[in-house]
Image (cartoon, helix red, strand yellow):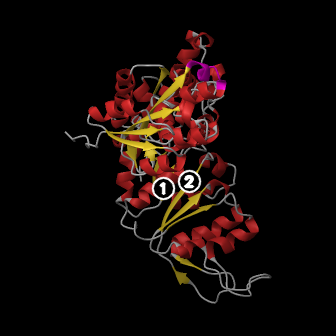
Amino acid sequence: MQKVKAYPRRVIYFTRDPAPQLLADIQQRDWAVEVIDSLHNVRHAVQDGAPAGGLVDLASVLESHDAHALQSCLALPNVGWVAMAETPQLDDPTTRRLVRDYCFDYVTLPAANTRIVDTVGHACGMIALGEPTFLDASSAEGEMIGTCDAMLALFRSIHKVAATDAPVFISGESGTGKELTAAAIHARSARRKAPFVAINCGAIPPALLQSELFGHERGAFTGANQRRVGRVESAHGGTLFLDEIGDLPYESQASLLRFLQENTIDRLGGQGSIAVDVRIICATHVDIEAAIEAGRFRSDLYHRLCVLRIDEPPLRARGKDIELLALYVLERYRKDASRRLYGFSPDAIMAMHGYDWPGNVRELINRVRRAIVMSEGRSITADDLELSAYARTSSATLAQARETAERQAIELALLRHRGRSADAARELGISRATLYRLIAAHGMRYGEESEVQH
């Protein structure tokens, strides 16, 4: 078992007029006391990050410091502040807010010194246990967080495909973290010391895509004042991630196919071919099989790209991971808050599980980050997340609960079997025809994959 690091027992006494007997009583408990009379000195005293009890004499400090400046000081981590205040001071809304949002506890004066010292000691002891930690590192794979079956399967797939050099096709809804998966594959591959180059195929105008991918020579076209190395060539030795490959213009798909077949590129305006060694990982939220049937995507290019396929699970199908991810975002960005936050309220957790998350992980990150900044309490509520309508338990009927559970079961079965409906139907104990009917009834889009695994 890992031992907790021992720190010196200390108290930061923030006052302009220290009480000699109180100071002596604190020292009698074998505490090291630092009497400090300015915000600058408080910040200097806590910069080493060691935990401490803090005693702030509000009557004294607010005579020379405004409440906003004091707020930034009391928000510093690793100090458990105890406020000393007289009753008339606590009638002031600003002072009450300071005490409520930034102090571990408070003592109304006059009070016995033993009570003050005991309260400060308790605050320091709680701070020494550490700030709230919301993430268990064992639930992470690089920057991806998850403990549900679908994510554990995804992590296993990442390790398997990272050991090969074959092209990888990542399919999933927008916002599910496809680029994080691609980066994780690269980081675990033999190419990890070489570049990882990402390009969004849907964000580049078609007229510029050839130059962006393959580069150009000086004078190749109007405005080409110097040679430019393309993204494919800049990824030489490493990994090229083609995001939103489903949005690649049809006229550009032939050039990409030629590169995949020959492993060479031709810069625009160039005189010869250049050999390039890259691993291709691509991703899309588009139903690529439907795009092939509609003539928008070349089937020969798809089969070149989709040697190994990974399906990203949507957030709504990840169960308890929703709360885990929200806590991770809170852990990462909680310093943006104007007060110390201690997690999510029960109604917020209920709302997060009741919401469908059409924007997936990206939407969750944005909602939690906004709530961190805008929250006015110690915990983030459903209202802070703008999801209060989903926190009402009475709004879900038994039929709706069954429908939600049925949809999630179908999604997970299809993910586990990489979209193969026959295998998913067998696992669910239903016929293939029934599975197709349920997919249509729930408005789900899953293309039928080949039964042959590459």
Q: Is residue 93 left or right of residue 14?
A: right
The kind of secondary structure element at disc 1 is: helix
The label on residue 283 is 2
- Considering only vertical position in the picture, is 167 above or below 77? below
Q: Place residue 282 in its image quadrant.
A: bottom right
Magenta segment: does it hold 92? yes
Q: Position of residue 398 (x, y in %)?
A: 55, 10
- Considering only vertical position in the picture, is 287 above or below 228? above
Q: Nearer the viewer's eye, disc 1 or disc 2?
A: 1
Residue at 49% from the left image edge and 42% from the top image edge: 76
Front residue of 101 and 434: 101
The amino acid pointed to by label 2 is: Ala
The kind of secondary structure element at disc 2 is: strand
The label on residue 291 is none
Question: Mark 2 and mark 1 in contact (Cβ < 8 Å)?
Answer: yes
Nearest to N terminus: mark 1 or mark 2: 1
The label on residue 182 is 1
Q: Is residue 340 left or right of residue 441?
A: left
